[in-house]
C-alpha cells in the first residue's frame, strides 16, 4: 500500500509540473514604443514600422566594418533563426539597423549577410538610408540603447542587445546578443519567448 501511495504522489507531482509548463504565459519586461520609421533594406526595398506591424520582430544594431561584436551577434541571430525554423515558427522578422549608414549601402549590407548561413534571408531586414545622427537619436529614444560614432577610428560604439518588438511596434524584451562565452547568449530563451508570444497573440 505504501508503494502505491508513493507512486500516486509522484504521478500527482508530474501532473502539476506538466500543467504549469502548459500554462506558461508571455510576460513583457518593457513597454518602449518604437518611433515611426521608413528605411531601405539590403534588397533595396522600403521597410517601415507600419509594414512590420502584425508580426513580432527581433531587432539589433550592427555595421559591416565592425571588428568586434557584430560578426558574433549576426551569427547568434542566425542560430536563433535556425531554431525557429526547426520548430516551424514563421510569423516574425529580423531587423538589423546599421549604425554606420554612410558606409553600409544596401549592396554592402547584402554582401555582409551573404557571409552567414541564414535559414531564410527573406525574413532579414538590414536597414540603412539615414544619417549617423538619426540612428544615434533613434537608438536612445526607441530602445534605450547607446549608439555613438568613435571619432578616433572607423568603428561605432553600440549596444549589443537583441530586442523583441511585438506586433504593435512595442519593445517588450531585451537579451544579450553577444557574450565572451557564446553559451551565455540566451538563444533558447529568445526562441521560447517568441514562440509563446506568437501562440498567444497571432
Image (cartoon, grey):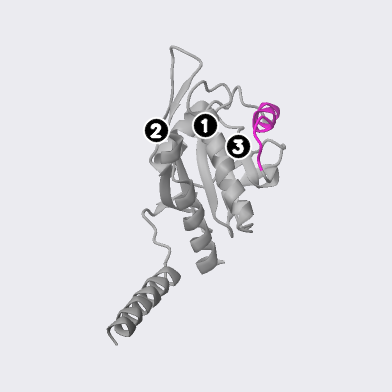
Q: Secondary structure at mark 2?
A: loop
Q: Quadrant of residue 54?
A: bottom right
Q: Quadrant of the N terminus?
A: bottom left
In the image, 122 versus 196, the foreground residue is 196
In the image, 160 versus 38, the foreground residue is 160
Mark 3 and mark 2 lie on one chain; the one further toward the N terminus is 3
Mark 1 and mark 2 lie on one chain; the one further toward the N terminus is 1
Label 1 Cα crowd, 10 Å radius (few <14 / some 14-19 / many 20+): some
Q: Nearer the viewer, mark 3 or mark 1?
A: 1
Mark 3 and mark 1 lie on one chain; the one further toward the N terminus is 1
The magenta segment is 107-118
Q: Residue at x 67, y 26 (%)?
A: 108
Q: Residue at x 38, y 41 (%)?
A: 144
Distance CA(mark 3)–CA(mark 1): 19 Å
Compared across the picture, whether 140 is left or right of 79 comes to: left
Tell me the tag on residue 53: none
Residue 18 percent across, percent down from the top left: 42, 72
Tell me the tag on residue 146: 2
Tell me the tag on residue 72: 1
Q: Are marks 3 and 1 in contact (CB under 8 Å)?
A: no
Distance CA(mark 1)–CA(mark 2): 19 Å
Tell me the tag on residue 127: 3
Residue 103 can be seen in this image: yes
Amino acid at each position: 500500500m505504501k508503494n502505491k501511495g508513493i507512486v500516486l504522489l509522484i504521478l500527482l507531482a508530474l501532473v502539476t509540473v506538466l500543467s504549469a509548463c502548459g500554462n506558461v504565459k508571455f510576460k513583457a519586461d518593457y513597454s518602449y514604443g518604437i518611433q515611426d520609421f521608413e528605411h531601405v533594406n539590403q534588397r533595396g526595398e522600403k521597410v517601415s514600422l507600419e509594414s512590420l506591424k502584425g508580426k513580432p520582430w527581433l531587432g539589433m544594431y550592427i555595421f559591416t566594418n565592425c571588428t568586434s561584436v557584430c560578426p558574433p551577434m549576426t551569427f547568434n541571430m542566425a542560430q536563433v533563426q535556425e531554431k525557429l525554423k526547426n520548430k516551424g515558427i514563421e510569423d516574425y522578422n529580423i531587423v538589423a539597423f546599421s549604425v554606420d549608414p554612410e558606409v553600409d549601402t544596401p549592396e554592402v549590407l547584402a554582401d555582409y549577410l551573404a557571409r552567414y548561413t541564414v535559414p531564410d534571408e527573406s525574413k532579414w531586414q538590414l536597414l540603412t538610408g539615414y544619417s549617423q545622427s538619426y540612428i544615434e537619436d533613434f537608438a536612445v529614444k526607441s530602445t534605450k540603447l547607446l549608439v555613438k560614432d568613435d571619432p578616433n577610428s572607423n568603428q561605432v560604439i553600440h549596444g549589443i542587445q537583441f530586442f523583441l518588438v511585438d506586433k504593435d511596434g512595442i519593445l517588450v524584451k531585451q537579451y544579450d546578443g553577444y557574450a565572451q562565452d557564446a553559451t551565455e547568449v540566451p538563444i533558447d530563451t529568445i526562441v521560447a519567448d517568441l514562440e509563446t508570444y506568437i501562440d498567444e497573440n497571432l
